[in-house]
Image (tube, rainbow, N blue to C red):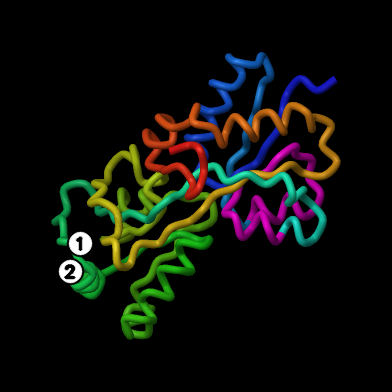
């Protein structure tokens, strides 16, 4: 008999999932335990057959796992939408990021720019390329190792300007969150969850998936800098 649902996720949803797991355990009596890792590493571990009951990653990563037959893509649910924020070290000057032009100036003036692995980092580098400054700023880019918050690099002075999912910048000591990217260049990532084939907790997993996608998580999503996924009932 299944007594604990074991899941793995990327770092962006770590706080959200911990709170939702606690709420669900109180409601259902079924314990849910999540391990969080860098998204690329988490996907690799699931693909390589490490024993998990469900996985929460960027929607495209879930689709790739489903295509290889590792997870049940037909049961995938969208649980949160995330946007990218900008932060600086506490006590440092706070550049204007209110418009695309202002953000571009801030990037151009920053001595070191930190960003994360995963879809947001890829999209950020594509934005720099669209601006025509990719080659110019390449020597100043600092990519956080998988699983390391960009905020940690800012707090210890390894970077002057940092970009990461808002949920990962909230509450980090030693930094100031300036806000989200301006709307014209905002990078949005949809996070989804799916059961891993071979799970012995499938009934519990299916119920937990419904719970995560429901309005029960509205306040929790907002508290962790996330939003309800587009088209969901959780608004």
> 55 above or below 117?
above
* Mark 2 closeness class: few <14, some 14–19, many ≥20 residues within 10 Å: some
Query: Viewed as shown, does residue 87 lie left or right of 129?
Result: left
Residue 49 falls inside the magenta stretch: yes
> 101 above or below 46?
below
Where does the image place residue 130, in percent across and percent down from the top left?
36, 81
Residue under the point 46% across and 64% down: 121
Where does the image place residue 234, in percent across and percent down from the top left?
48, 37
Residue 112 falls inside the magenta stretch: no
- Asked whether disc 1 touches disc 2, contact meaning CB atoms under 8 Å apart, the reply is yes
Residue under the point 46% across and 49% down: 81
Residue under the point 17% across and 53% down: 92
Where does the image place residue 187, in percent across and percent down from the top left?
40, 62
Locate residue 218: give its quadrant: top left
Label 1: state its secondary structure: loop
> 109 above or below 183?
below
Residue sitting nearer the eye, 168 or 159: 168
Part of the protein shown in magenta: 41-64
Residue sitting nearer the eye, 114 or 7: 7
Compare marks 1 and 2 and give the one earlier in the sequence.
Answer: 1
**Mark sitting on residue 10:** none
Locate residue 109: give its quadrant: bottom left
Residue under the point 25% across and 54% down: 88
Residue sitting nearer the eye, 35 or 233: 233
Residue at which label 1 appears = 97
Locate residue 97: give its quadrant: bottom left
Where does the image place residue 226, in percent across and percent down from the top left?
41, 43
* Mark 1 closeness class: few <14, some 14–19, many ≥20 residues within 10 Å: some
How far is mark 1 from mark 2, CA to CA?
5 Å
Q: Quadrant of the C terminus?
A: top left
**Mark sitting on residue 102:** 2
Label 2: state its secondary structure: helix
């Amino acid at each position: 008999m299944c007594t604990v649902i074991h899941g793995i996720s990327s770092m962006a949803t770590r706080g959200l999932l911990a709170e939702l797991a606690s709420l669900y355990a109180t409601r259902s009596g079924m314990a849910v335990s999540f391990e969080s890792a860098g998204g690329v590493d988490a996907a690799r571990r699931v693909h390589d057959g490490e024993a998990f009951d469900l996985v929460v990653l960027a929607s495209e990563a879930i689709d790739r796992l489903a295509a290889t037959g590792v997870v049940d893509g037909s049961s995938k649910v969208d649980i949160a939408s995330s946007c990218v924020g900008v932060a600086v070290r506490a006590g440092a000057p706070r550049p204007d990021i209110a418009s695309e032009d202002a953000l571009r100036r801030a990037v151009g003036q920053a001595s070191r720019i930190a960003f994360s692995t995963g879809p947001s980092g890829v999209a950020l580098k594509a934005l720099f390329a669209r601006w025509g400054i990719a080659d110019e700023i390449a020597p100043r880019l600092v990519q956080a190792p998988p699983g390391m918050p960009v905020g940690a690099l800012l707090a210890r002075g390894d970077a002057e300007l940092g970009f990461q999912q808002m949920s990962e910048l909230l509450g980090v000591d030693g930094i100031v969150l300036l806000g989200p990217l301006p709307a014209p260049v905002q990078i949005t990532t949809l996070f989804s969850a799916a059961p891993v084939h071979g799970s012995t907790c499938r009934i519990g997993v299916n119920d937990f998936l419904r719970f995560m996608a429901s309005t029960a998580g509205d306040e929790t999503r907002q508290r962790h800098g996330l939003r309800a996924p587009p088209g969901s009932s959780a608004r």
